[in-house]
Structures are given as C-alpha cells and as structure tokens.
Amino acid sequence: MNANDPAVVRFRERFAADILGVEEFRGETAVSVKPARIVEMLRSLREDPECPFEMLTDLTAVDYLRLDRPERFAVVYQLYSVLANRRIRVKAYVNEARCEIDSATGLWADANWLEREVWDLYGIRFLGHPDLRRILMPDTYEGHPLRKDYPLKGRGERSNFPKYLVEEPE
C-alpha cells in the first residue's frame, strides 16, 4: 500500500489536522499521528468502505529516548485488510509526562493482551482498558524494562535468585 492509495488519501483528508507525517518504505505505509483521536482514527481505518483494515496484527511501542521525535514514545498499530490484502502502520506519539493513550480494546479484542504487554514493558497507560495489569513481569516488579533508561543490569532483581540461575556455565 502506498501513500497515494485511496484508503490512505481518505484517511489523510479526514484527519489532516492530527497527522504528523506519512512515510512509505518498501511498499508499506506508516502514518504518524497525534494521540488525541486515536480510537476514532483506528475505527475509520477498520470501517473504511473500500479497504477495511479489520485485523489488528500487532500493537507495540517504541522508546525514542534521545532521538529527534515529536515525543519520547510511540504506540504502533499494525493493521491488515484481508479484503484488499494490504497493511498500514499507525504510530501515535505519546507524551512522556502523561504517558497514556485511549485503549483500542473496543475495536479489536486482541488489543487487550497487546496493550497489557505495552503497559508492562513500557509503562504506557491505556485509558479505558478493561483489565490493565502486568502480563509478563511479576506483579511486584518495579519499573518497565523495555524503556531505554532502564538499567542494563536491572535493579538487583537477580541478587535474590539461586546462584546456579545467574552464573554462566563453565
């Protein structure tokens, strides 16, 4: 799908004020957006009459710490249209101070676990999520380990493990 595809053009016309940029790389289109209307934007792509992106194939985040981006974090939605056999990527930039965005669980059921994973590993809160809690890390774990400012050696979690679990084999 390219940036001149009718579905992308319709999307750009409808949300022009909220679009930060459109990139195309190797035939895939990525649209960078402001997060305020993310659910409305995703719904318009899901319900596009000619090219419905009815599948959320992935939802993740990127930490752009110390890089030239509108905000530190981006929540990335990978969408797929079965009908048109096309993909589109939507990147919503999230402010580090608030670190939250509306939940897409009302649009796609699989957003539930994917948003929990992003919350757990990056600390981005999804407003309106039905059960936002840790999914990979223990409930008592402090911090979000995929943030670029998280210490590489961790925060001493390994000091309580039995010695044979943390030593390299000889």
Image (cartoon, rainbow, N blue to C red):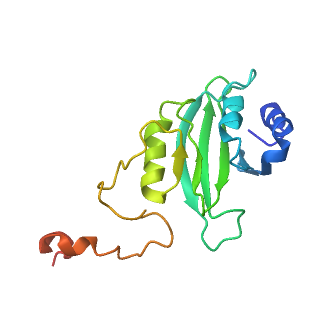
Q: Locate residue 29 relative to residue 75 in the image: left or right.
A: right
**Percent coordinates x, y for residue 46 in the rendering:** 66, 28
**Percent coordinates x, y for residue 158 in the rendering:** 24, 72
Closer to us: 52 or 136: 136
Height in image: 107 above or below 24? Answer: above
Which residue appears at 70% of the width and 34% of the height?
40
Which residue appears at 79% of the width and 36% of the height?
11
Which residue appears at 66% of the width and 71% of the height?
67
Closer to us: 128 or 23: 128
Quarter of the image for the C terminus: give it. bottom left
**Percent coordinates x, y for residue 30 in the rendering:** 71, 48
Q: Locate residue 86 relative to residue 155 in the image: left or right.
A: right
**Percent coordinates x, y for residue 1 in the rendering:** 73, 38
| Image quadrant assignment for residue 47 | top right
Height in image: 160 above or below 22? Answer: below
Number of numbered tags placed on the structure image: 0
Which residue appears at 46% of the width and 63% of the height?
146
Closer to us: 68 or 26: 68
Closer to us: 98 or 76: 98
